[in-house]
Image (cartoon, rainbow, N blue to C red):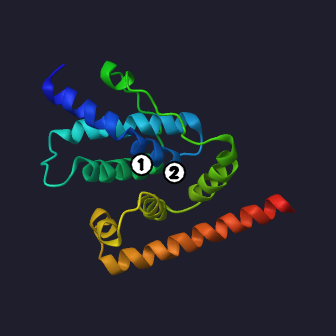
């Protein structure tokens, strides 16, 4: 294994939680989540040689992962048959939630699945505690626009969750 491959795999291992969260936000079943997880790693590896290190690896990975998720979601061909021993050797992280959180997390992810791809990205950045300025940079929009869009995305998410809760109590 080359030093570049080793460096990449170490960075991916360090940031695999981000990839897992994005996969879970954009895909609603476990098989598709795993496929997207691998596709993100594959796409990141393909473009890693072009990573110019003008930003942090995590920032670059967020953007790569979100772009991959959006393309993956839109594509009719959701299966990418990647056969690389190094990528196959990476484990998909287990969900870090306990039984008490499961129902609330499922409710939240079910609601997130109903959002548009851009709203999902905004909610992801919000959940990752990105400031408005960084969200704007990631999405290539102004900070004011990012904050407005985030506010609207949170309102949509809240409406969906309230509807789901009302449906579950009736």
Q: How crowded is mark 1: few (under 14 residues within 10 Å), some or many (20 or more)?
A: many
Disc 2: which residue: 25
Element type where label 1 sits in the image: helix
Callout 2: SS: helix
Residue 29 vertical position relative to residue 74 in the rendered view, above or below:
above
User: Quick one: label 2, few (<14), some, or many (20+) residues within 10 Å?
Assistant: many
Q: Which residue is at the far right? A: 170
Query: Which corner quadrant holds the C terminus?
Result: bottom right
Tell me: 161 left or right of 87: right
Q: Position of residue 85 (x, y in %)?
A: 33, 18
User: Does 22 sit above or below residue 79?
Assistant: below
Q: Is residue 113 left or right of residue 90?
A: right
Q: Tell me which residue sits at (55%, 39%) in the image.
A: 95
Report x, y in % for residue 91: 43, 27
Q: In the rendering, at what x and y percent does residue 10 appear? A: 26, 32
* Above/below status of 90 relative to 45: above
Q: What residue sits 16% from the left and 46% below the top? A: 51
* Nearer-the-camera pick, 77 or 91: 91
């Amino acid at each position: 294994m080359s030093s570049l491959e080793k460096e990449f795999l170490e960075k991916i291992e360090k940031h695999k939680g981000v990839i897992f969260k994005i996969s879970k936000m954009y895909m609603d079943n476990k098989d598709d989540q795993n496929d997207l997880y691998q596709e993100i790693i594959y796409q990141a590896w393909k473009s890693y040689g072009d990573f110019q290190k003008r930003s942090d690896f995590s920032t670059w990975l967020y953007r790569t992962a979100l772009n991959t998720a959006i393309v993956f979601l839109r594509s009719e061909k959701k299966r990418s048959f990647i056969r690389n021993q190094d990528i196959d050797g990476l484990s998909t992280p287990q969900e870090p939630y306990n039984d008490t959180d499961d129902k609330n997390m499922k409710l939240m992810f079910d609601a997130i699945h109903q959002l548009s791809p851009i709203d999902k990205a905004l909610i992801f950045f919000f959940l990752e505690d990105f400031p408005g300025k960084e969200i704007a940079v990631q999405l290539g929009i102004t900070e004011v626009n990012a904050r407005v869009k985030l506010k609207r995305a949170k309102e949509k998410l809240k409406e969906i969750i309230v509807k789901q809760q009302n449906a579950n109590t009736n």
